[in-house]
Image (cartoon, rainbow, N blue to C red):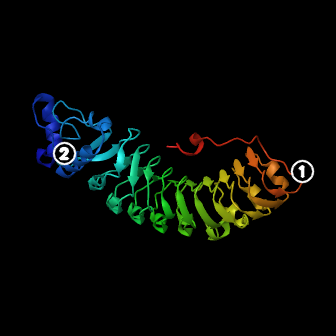
Amino acid sequence: MELSVLSSCLIFAVLSLVLPDATFCKTLKRDVKALNEIKASLGWRVVYSWVGDDPCGEGNLPPWSGVTCSTQGDYRVVTELEVYAVSIVGPFPTAVTNLLDLTRLDLHNNKLTGPIPSQIGRLKHLKILNLRWNKLQDVIPPEIGELKSLTHLYLSFNNFKGEIPAELANLPELRYLYLQENRLSGRIPAGLCSLPNLQHLDVGNNHIVGTLRELTRNEGCFPALRNFYLNNNYLTGGIPSQLANITNLEILYLSYNKMSGAIPPELAHIPRLTFLYLDHNQFSGRIPNDFYKHPFLKEMYIEGNSFRPGVKPIGVHRVLELSDTEFLF
């Protein structure tokens, strides 16, 4: 291979082995400027470990803690930013949206306030966005639907309000969607049903209304879904028999809604159904015998309903721990 086709970064890396004083390739000025703006806005808990002006490291200085860089052509760019559980206080740092090569942004378990800026839609390479356990407010920006590479979206345990953006249905790679413990209202967008890779959907502990029938009426709905958390909302109506078409379902959590009617026997034919939470609704009638013969069903909670006398639960009722639902990746 001709030397001329090698990037200057690679040349510098080779030279550094024989010439210790050789200069490494530079970090893209855009990223240096953005990270230094973020540094200026953060508290001492982060800043004290961010030494030097180059977040990717310079001379004998290592990269800043929580910053991951990679080489693209003649420059280094910031690809991951993880600054969590350090009590960051204040608004979401808008300068983050200038880090256009980010694939992972993790600011969870801080004290961020205010809205997520609409400029978040600029981060086209983002795969993981983790903002849970903050105090973020306002609506979830629809621009998140522009992040076509996104696989993990964690917005739980904040103060978001308004409806779940229909634009989230435009995320073909999305696998994990955590929206629980907010103040979200309205209906779950029907388009989420068509996401081909969605495995975990949690909208528990919000103010969601509507019915399961209107959400699952389309053929081929939720083809990859394994965990479906709808608990502690205001859902009404019955459990539709077509829910049994979600054949990968393992956890169905419907507790503390206003649902009613009989439990369809088709639900017992979901092959790997393991946890079924029906408690504290207005269900009635009998539980079909096939549920008690299901080879995988470990727990079925039924209290707080109007089932006929003699209907029995499966397993011992326990409170789900956060580790069961919140920390899966």
Q: Nearer the viewer, residue 114 or 328?
A: 114
Residue 17 position within the rendered picture, expressed as x and y whole percent measured from the top left: 15, 30
Residue 219 is at least partly visible in this image: no
Residue 191 is at least partly visible in this image: yes
Residue 214 position within the rendered picture, expressed as x and y whole percent measured from the top left: 64, 71
Q: Quadrant of residue 55?
A: top left
Q: Are marks 1 and 2 in contact (CB under 8 Å)?
A: no
- Decide: few, some or many residues near mark 2? Use Cα within 10 Å; few <14, some 14-19, many ≥20: many
| Residue located beneath label 2 in the image | 27
**Number of numbered tags placed on the structure image:** 2
- In the image, taking residue 297 as reference, residue 24 lies left or right, namely left
| Residue located beneath label 1 in the image | 310
Instruction: Give whichever of discs 1 and 2 has the lower sequence position.
Output: 2
- In the image, taking residue 299 as reference, residue 96 lies left or right, namely left
At 39% from the left and 60% from the top, the residue drawn is: 147
Q: Quadrant of residue 247?
A: bottom right
